[in-house]
């Protein structure tokens, strides 16, 4: 049972980090299927907790070849762009979202789509909480569609990435989700 | 709070701006292929230890039958500078010693500029739709398109634009991998 977001936000950063539910490789290897029938409106997904350091940011810049100085050059960030520090990449945040949805739908569901906005500036030292809450569910074409609100909050409750997503889960006793995924016609 | 553009506000959604909706860039082949080393660096940087990305024996037993690749990963291949191109970083700092590190690098397949006097750009949001996981060895093609351009009016009474650029990613078999959309505010 995941710790409710509301409770997490009353905790210290260390207490929040201790409740990280990001799965290990072995947990992802052996994950059992969550079916459409297992999910209810109002359910909270597991919370993924991150505590980015300047080194994490540098690694991300290097991995995707993003050379913008606001992400690794503190002098430039403070004095040229007048930012509070070097900044966590929006590209990293938006890359966490498909991972989060993939992990929830594994091994045979599908992380179909997501949309979100970038709002607050995130900096090293922040504790970040990736969260989602189920808002709707419906069946279509022998597939189960789960809609959710999601985001990435700081330890202070500032929402840096409000958004929503739709994922597809198999029905109990139903067929596999087609792969490659084909969106149902409206 | 914004609202739909009112008639007493000078519209910035001119016929020339509206005509940009649907305009496509060239279909571009990204430099290189999807390879295990880029996959390792990417998944470690995003902190996703999923063995579907690196354990070939396990991957063969999964729903997908092979190593898979995060679709969002291939979206960053569009920014690669060809090795036979001018060194973009050196050029950026030659042009401006206080360069932000990116400079005015023109990316392949870029869309023509929107014909507007509005210059200030802010990120308004992102979307991703996922249809198929890329595989190791895939060649990635991408194409930009102006998906939508809308007008809104800010609290200051001035009209601004919300421009949504869509990028479609396909592989060497023309299979659709994913679609991303980025909306930006132009004030």
Image (cartoon, grey):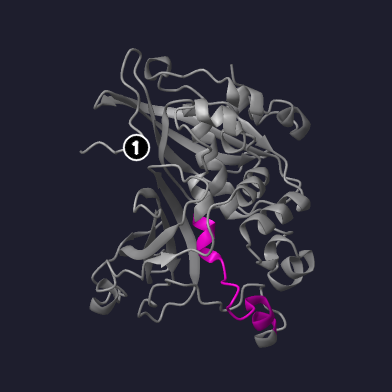
User: On what subunit does the disc labeled 1 rest?
Assistant: A
Q: Secondary structure at mark 1?
A: loop
Residue at image coords 61%, 77%? B103
- Residue A65, relative to residue A139: is it above or below? below
Seen from the viewer's position, the closer of residues B63 and B18 is: B63
Q: Quadrant of residue B53?
A: top right
Instruction: Indicate yes or no whether the magenta region holds residue B77.
Output: yes
Q: Is residue A37 left or right of residue A154?
A: left
Q: Residue at x 62, y 77 (%)?
A: B88
**Looking at this rendering, what residue extends furthest in the left direction?**
A186
Foreground residue among A136 and A61: A61
Residue B107: say if magenta: no
Residue at 52 percent of width and 65 percent of height: B31
Q: Which residues are magenta?
A: B75-93
Q: Which residue is mark 1?
A: A181
Query: Going by the image, does B168 lie left or right of A78?
Result: left
Work out whether B13 lies above or below A51: below
Quarter of the image with the N terminus of chain A is top right
The image quadrant of residue B18 is: bottom left
């Amino acid at each position: 049972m995941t710790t409710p977001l509301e409770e997490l936000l009353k905790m210290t950063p260390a207490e929040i980090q201790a409740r990280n539910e990001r799965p290990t490789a072995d947990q992802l290897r052996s994950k059992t299927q969550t079916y459409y029938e297992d999910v209810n409106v109002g359910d909270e997904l597991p919370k993924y907790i991150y505590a980015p350091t300047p080194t994490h940011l540098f690694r991300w810049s290097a991995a995707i070849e993003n050379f913008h100085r606001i992400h690794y050059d503190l002098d430039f960030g403070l004095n040229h762009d007048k930012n509070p520090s070097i900044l966590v990449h929006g590209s990293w945040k938006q890359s966490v979202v498909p991972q989060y949805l993939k992990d929830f739908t594994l091994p045979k569901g599908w992380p179909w789509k997501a949309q979100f906005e970038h709002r607050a500036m995130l900096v090293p030292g922040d504790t970040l909480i990736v969260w989602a809450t189920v808002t709707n569910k419906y069946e279509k074409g022998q597939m189960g569609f789960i809609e959710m609100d999601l985001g990435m909050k700081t330890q202070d409750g500032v929402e840096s990435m409000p958004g929503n997503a739709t994922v597809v889960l198999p029905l109990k006793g139903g067929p596999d989700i087609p792969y490659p995924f084909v969106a149902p016609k409206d | 709070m914004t609202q739909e553009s009112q008639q007493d506000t000078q519209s910035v959604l001119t016929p020339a701006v509206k005509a940009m909706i649907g305009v496509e860039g060239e279909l571009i082949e990204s430099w290189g292929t999807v390879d295990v080393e880029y996959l390792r660096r990417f998944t470690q940087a995003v902190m996703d230890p999923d063995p579907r990305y690196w354990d070939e024996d396990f991957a063969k037993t999964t729903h997908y039958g092979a190593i898979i690749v995060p679709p969002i990963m291939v979206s960053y291949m569009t920014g690669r500078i060809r090795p036979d191109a001018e060194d973009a970083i050196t050029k950026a700092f030659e042009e401006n010693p206080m360069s932000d590190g990116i400079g005015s690098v023109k990316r392949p397949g870029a869309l023509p500029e929107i014909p507007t006097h509005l210059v200030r750009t802010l990120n308004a949001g992102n979307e991703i739709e996922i249809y198929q996981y890329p595989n190791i060895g895939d060649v990635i093609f991408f194409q930009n398109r102006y998906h939508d351009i809308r007008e809104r009016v800010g609290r200051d009474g001035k009209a601004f634009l919300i421009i949504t650029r869509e990028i479609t990613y396909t592989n060497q078999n023309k299979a659709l991998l994913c679609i991303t959309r980025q909306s930006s505010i132009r004030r």
